[in-house]
Amino acid sequence: MAMKKEKKRSFFERISGGMRLTDEDAKTEEVETRIQAREESEGTDPWATEEETEGELALDVYQTPSDIIVQTFVAGVRPEDLEINITRDMLTIRGKRQESQTVREGDFFSRELYWGSFSRSVSLPQEVQPDEAEAMERHGLLTIKLPKVDKNKRSHVKVKSV
C-alpha cells in the first residue's frame, strides 16, 4: 500500500487551521458557484420557502403628559385596508399594501418596496384607555393617540338610600 505524501502546510494554513484546495476541490467550488449564479438569475432559490411572510412596520412610540403616541408610515395603504386593535397594554396594526401596477419580474433593475400584508404588535409602556383612542392618517403618516390610564384619579361615589 503506497502512502500518499502530504504537502507541507504554509504558515497561514497552520495558524488559521485552513487547508489548501486541490484542483478537484477548486473545480467543484467553481461548478457550485455557476449553479448558484444561474439560480439567482432565473429567480429560483432551492432554499426559499413557498410561504408568504408578512412585512413588519417600523414604529415611533413616545409619550406626552396625558397620552402614548404611536406613529408609522402607511403610504399606499387605504384606510379601509388597515386594522388597529388596542388593549390596555398592547397595540396591533395590520394591513395590506396593494401593488397598483403590473411589471414583469425581468424588467426590474432594483426592487426594494414592500407590497403585501404587514403587521406589528407592540407592548405599550403604560396602560391606556382603548375606548378613547384616536387614529388619523395624513400624507402617509399614521398617528395613533392612546390616552394613558390615570391611576391617581379619584372619584367620589355617593351612597344612595334604597
Image (tube, grey):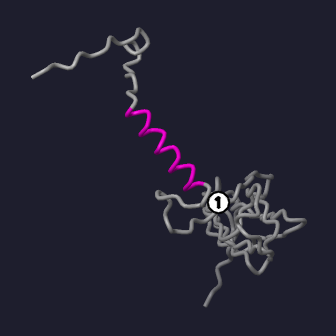
155 and 21: which is toward the camera: 21
Would you say 160 lies left or right of 73 here?
A: left
Q: Residue at x 67, y 74 (%)?
A: 157
The verdict on residue 37 being magenta is yes
Q: Quadrant of residue 96?
A: bottom right
Q: Residue at x 23, y 15 (%)?
A: 5
Q: Quadrant of residue 79?
A: bottom right
The verdict on residue 142 being magenta is no
Would you say 112 lies left or right of 34 here?
A: right
- Work out whether 17 lies above or below 111: above
**What range is drawn magenta here?**
24-40
83 and 11: which is toward the camera: 11
- Work out whether 48 lies above or below 28: below
- Work out whether 9 lies above or below 35: above
Q: Label 1, on which residue?
A: 56
Q: Position of residue 87 (x, y in %)?
A: 61, 69
Would you say 133 lies left or right of 125 here?
A: right
Q: Quadrant of the C terminus?
A: bottom right
Q: Position of residue 7 (x, y in %)?
A: 31, 14
Identity of the residue furthest to the top in this view: 11
Question: In the rendered structure, which amino acid carries the disc numbered 1?
Answer: Glu
Q: How many marks?
A: 1
Q: Position of residue 84 (x, y in %)?
A: 69, 72
Q: Residue at x 69, y 59 (%)?
A: 57
- Work out whether 14 lies above or below 132: above
Q: Position of residue 136 (x, y in %)?
A: 84, 70
The kind of secondary structure the magenta stretch mainly shows is helix
Mark 1 packing: few (<14 Cα in 10 Å), some, or many (20+)?
some
Q: Secondary structure at mark 1?
A: strand
Identity of the residue furthest to the front in this view: 2
4 and 131: which is toward the camera: 4
Q: Quadrant of residue 152?
A: bottom right
